[in-house]
Image (spheres, rainbow, N blue to C red):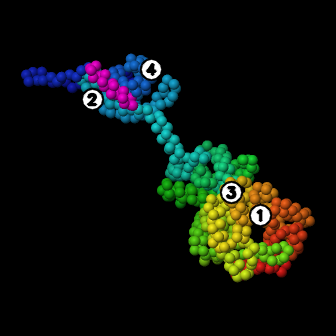
Amino acid sequence: MSDSIPSPPRPPAPPGGRGATTAPRPPSTLPAALALPLKEVLDADGSAVMLLDLAGRPRLINRSGLELLDATTIDDVAPGTPAHSVLRSLLDHVPRRLLLGANGGRWHGDFDHTNKAGQHQVFRATVVVHRVDGLFDGGFVGVTAHDVTVARAENARLRHRADHDPLTGLANRRQIITHLASAISNHRGRAGHVAAIFIDVDRLKYVNDALGHAVGDRLLVSTAERLRDAVRPSDSVARIGGDEFLVVCSAIPDAAVALDLAERIRRALSGRLHVHQLDLKFSVSIGLALSEHDIVSMPDDAAASALISNADTAMYEAKNSGRGRCVLFSSQMRSAARERTELAAALALAVNERRLDVQYQPVFSAISQNAVGAEALVRWHHPQLGRIDPATFVSIAEESGSIGRLGEFVLEQSMTDARLWIEQGLVDDNFSVHVNVSLIQLASSSFVNLVTQMLRHHRLRPEQLVLEAREASLLGRNVDVERSIRALRRSGVQIAIDNFGTGAKALSVLTDIGADVLKLDGSLALPSGSSDADTRLVRAIVLLAHALEMRVIAERVSGIEQLRRLRAAGCDYVQGNLLAEPGPADGLTVKTNY
């Protein structure tokens, strides 16, 4: 752009003659009496204000305008100076038609500027061009501008925050769905597929419950870092849920290539993580779905949602098949996913309407053959599907978030039955009821109060309740869980470590968790085929537990020889189908013949 703004052709002057008048011509400069007060007014404004003639020469600049131009006085903005080049840079943004037009006009926009200190700034400017004969030799250019650097950076930060996961820095669900919809749209009519790879970190909930959210977060951050390194440069990665990640891949020729990529991701995300002096072994389950014809025939947003849903369904199939594997979606999986969703809804309804059964398996003294307690075991008979395996519906309860209500139901029912047994004279008031609890319950801030109120309501002493927590879930240090366990034990409630002997660091649980009872896992409780070395190991565990003032229950006792050896090893209590099978409350067995 030249240093002056060219003037458009002027219309011819009206002819002179009798009766003709000549309009007064505006002044070619601002009178000093007007310029000084006007500058004072403009200095009070926080915006930069500049008045230029059509040759680009500054005629009036307020204080903020001088600061924007890195100038001290208006003389520092003369043509050829660095400050004037900033002005020219601004005017270069203004359309030529506006500058050349006979009627002038207005332009509004942003321009970038780097000041003397090397700092990048963004200004929002309005430029007004007025054609006025006689003023500044034909008109003027008015400029107002204000610094929007901070506002733009804040807007960028908010946009990034709206589209990204704050923990891992990956794209979030909203952004990846938008990207996936665009990828499907762009791929229509081309060969190959768009692939959605749905990744779930196995057992993250147990890591959070057992070790705390700080360890779980570190695992997620590590997963995100490994995932970035494992995918192709053209792939997009997002964290779309608590333990869920999604990878979107375009130009996938066939299912075999997609499975190879998914398997590469699975290997990269599986292994060990050393955090907080713990060596964690972790894995991921992966579901994979391709944009087949039924997907691409949908509108973009619907296609993206359907493809993610298919990949999610395949991921659950991977989990149900044993975790730590990749599964490609097939249409047959939809019915299985629908059945699991329907089962979760039916379970929630059954819990709310108390349509579950609680059966009891007695715990016997290893010496007297009398029952000293009974373990509550929840059972569910679905009205259409019949008996549902407890491992299946407990897993569904954990996934769907209804495990807390399920656990509360079992606690309430078992205490009700215990009070009835005592009142019927079937057992004495030293009889204890054993109830399995999840770490989700133990980590709840209201759990201790809930248990205390239930015991008081059913007129049971705290010592009559034994809460059993699985050994694997107790590995690590969870502040909330430990706080609940300490409070429960102070009140008199007994804590049992269930399935002891299944973990790689089983012995550490004995010292890390304060407990009253140790339940030997059935695989360790000298089953058929056990050797003398196995017997010595059990005897050593019993001696250690007794040294820690813990009583020992051997579970899953199924044979007479096994029972004899467990008694010889010093076990305090025994439990299993040999002695009594689980049964309804009104059929409780209180004495065994073995």
- Tell me if label 1 and label 4 are in contact, CB under 8 Å: no
Helix, strand or loop at disc 4?
A: helix
Q: Mark 3 to mark 2: distance in Å?
A: 81 Å
Q: Is residue 36 magenta?
A: yes
Q: Is residue 481 above or below residue 593?
A: above
Whole-percent x, y for residue 105 in the image = 30, 32
Q: Residue furthest left?
A: 18
Report the amino acid beneath label 4. Answer: Pro
Disc 2 versus disc 4: nearer the observer? 4
Helix, strand or loop at disc 1?
A: loop
Q: Quadrant of the C terminus?
A: bottom right
Disc 4 versus disc 3: nearer the observer? 3
Q: Mark 4 to mark 3: distance in Å?
A: 68 Å
Report the amino acid beneath label 3. Answer: Arg
Q: What's the mark number on residue 102?
A: 2
Disc 3 versus disc 2: nearer the observer? 3
Closer to the chain start, of discs 2 and 1, is 2
Q: Which residue is mark 4?
A: 82
Q: Is residue 103 left or right of residue 191?
A: left
Q: Mark 2 to mark 4: distance in Å?
A: 30 Å
Q: What's the mark number on residue 483?
A: 3
Q: In which quadrant of the rendered view does residue 107 lie? A: top left
Q: Mark 1 to mark 4: distance in Å?
A: 82 Å
Residue 321 visible in the displayed image: no
